[in-house]
Image (cartoon, grey):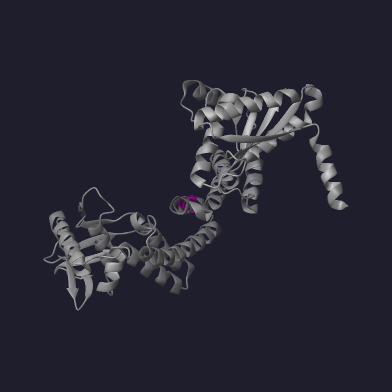
């Protein structure tokens, strides 16, 4: 390679950006403009080029056009004009020969595409035999992988196909490096690896591995905070049981916390700091009203209260509130259900007492623990909550409820068990 050769870097992982000799080009504020989509489609197919038919289909999303050729030519003109204005080297910027479109390769410049470099490095890593060499190649590839392919057009078919292939390679990269760093007891790099993976693909469960890395780094409090967020996501958002791996993480966190929290002065200081944050409004949690917690924490509160009922001498009721439509049927519209659910959460926070506890049980239901409440008071509480919900969302918002005393729950469970055994 000549020493005077200049470099054009095309970034498509995590964002779309073009740099010439380290200077990033500017294409305007609209990141989803059609001329930008056209440029990205052509860059994505830089090796083999893209046929005119496919280019039209991808850019115009298979819409019927009165004059396809004219529409494409107008967009090509706009793309070339914007590339020239931005400072891109070249004369035509986009080549079109025999119905195949490719980026122009101006003399004296070398193109570099992050997604293509990532693929090549992963391929070399897969072919490498020595673990150290494989890890080094995967580390170079991982440094390039700053996010999903072309996020502004991530839902379009021409991106999805390539994005799936890249994700498969990235997942393999993370699995190998995770095992490699664990064997080396390199917990700092293990943490960085899973932190990046969890950021890029929050739906892929890498948070569990990140929690594990935090535990290995002795960042127990941080691991516990992330555990709570992850448990809330599984129970409240996905509405599925906690994975076994996450439960095992909690057991390890618990054991670590028992060791690192022996100094009661530190614990008191942490509580006072939390209380000061609540009073100053720096914390994100509400400062007054009833107490909302994740479902896992709700179960812990329930078990503590149930075991201490006889000593407390007060009655405790559990109430299940269910959102329904004005006909008493389940709400089918997801957007409406989500809005009603958030409104009900606000109604519960404002309508219950500070000593009461509640949690989200499903997309349409909340569980409440009403402490020191008589059975006849439960209907009054329900009426107050129903009125508050209507104030927040309108007169057609409806709510159903069921109650059970904590004292009655063991008998109910025994009865159910006997019926099942029978």
Compared to 270, does 400 lie above or below? below
**In-front residue for pair 56/240:** 56
> Image quadrant of residue 72?
bottom left
The majority secondary structure of the magenta stretch comes to helix
**Left or right: 144 as drawn, with respect to 234:** left
**Residue depicted at 77% across the width and 22% down the height:** 314
> Image quadrant of residue 397?
top right
Report whether residue 207 is seen: yes
Residue 90 percent location from the top left of the image: 13, 65
**Residue depicted at 18% across the width and 60% down the height:** 79
**In-front residue for pair 322/183:** 322
Highlighted range, magenta: 188-192
Magenta run includes residue 81: no
Magenta run includes residue 191: yes
Report whether residue 356 is seen: no
Q: In the orientation shown, which residue stands out farthest toward the bottom?
A: 98
Residue 378 percent location from the top left of the image: 70, 26
**Left or right: 420 as drawn, with respect to 49:** right
Which quarter shows the N terminus? bottom left
**Left or right: 88 as drawn, with respect to 306:** left
Residue 360 percent location from the top left of the image: 60, 38
**In-front residue for pair 124/328:** 328
**Residue depicted at 27% across the width and 62% down the height:** 40
Residue 389 percent location from the top left of the image: 55, 30
């Amino acid at each position: 390679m000549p020493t005077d050769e200049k470099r054009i870097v095309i970034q498509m992982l995590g964002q779309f950006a073009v740099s010439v000799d380290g200077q990033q080009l500017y294409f305007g504020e609209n990141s989803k403009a059609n001329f930008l989509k056209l440029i990205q489609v052509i860059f994505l197919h830089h090796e083999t080029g893209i046929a005119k038919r496919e280019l039209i289909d991808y850019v115009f999303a298979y819409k019927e056009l009165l004059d396809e050729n004219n529409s494409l030519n107008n967009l090509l003109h706009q793309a070339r004009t914007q590339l020239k204005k931005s400072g891109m080297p070249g004369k035509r910027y986009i080549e079109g020969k025999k119905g195949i479109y490719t980026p122009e390769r101006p003399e004296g410049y070398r193109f570099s595409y992050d997604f293509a470099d990532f693929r090549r490095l992963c391929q070399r890593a897969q072919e490498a035999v020595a673990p150290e060499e494989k890890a080094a190649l995967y580390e170079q590839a991982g440094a390039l992988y700053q996010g999903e392919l072309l996020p502004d057009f991530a839902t379009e078919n021409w991106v999805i196909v390539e994005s799936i292939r890249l994700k498969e390679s990235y997942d393999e990269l993370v699995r190998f490096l995770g095992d490699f760093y664990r064997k080396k007891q390199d917990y700092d790099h293990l943490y960085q690896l899973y932190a990046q993976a969890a950021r890029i693909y929050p739906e892929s469960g890498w948070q569990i591995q990140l929690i594990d890395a935090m535990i290995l780094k002795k960042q127990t409090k941080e691991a516990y905070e992330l555990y709570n967020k992850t448990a809330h996501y599984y129970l409240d958002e996905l509405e599925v049981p906690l994975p076994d791996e996450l439960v095992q993480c909690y057991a390890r966190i618990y054991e670590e916390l028992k060791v690192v929290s022996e100094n009661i002065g530190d614990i008191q200081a942490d509580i006072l700091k939390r209380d000061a944050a609540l009073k100053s409004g720096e914390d994100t949690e509400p400062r007054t009203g009833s107490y909302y917690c994740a479902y896992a924490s709700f179960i812990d509160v329930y078990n503590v209260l149930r075991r201490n009922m006889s000593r407390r001498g007060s009655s405790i009721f559990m109430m299940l509130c269910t959102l329904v439509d004005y006909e008493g049927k389940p709400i089918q519209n997801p957007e409406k259900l989500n809005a009603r659910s958030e409104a009900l959460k606000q109604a519960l926070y404002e309508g219950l007492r500070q000593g009461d506890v509640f949690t989200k049980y499903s997309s349409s239901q909340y569980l409440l623990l009403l402490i020191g409440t008589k059975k006849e008071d439960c209907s009054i509480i329900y009426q107050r909550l129903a009125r508050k919900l209507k104030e927040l969302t309108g007169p057609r918002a409806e709510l159903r409820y069921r109650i059970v005393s904590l004292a009655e729950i063991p008998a109910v469970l025994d009865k159910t068990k006997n019926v099942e055994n029978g």
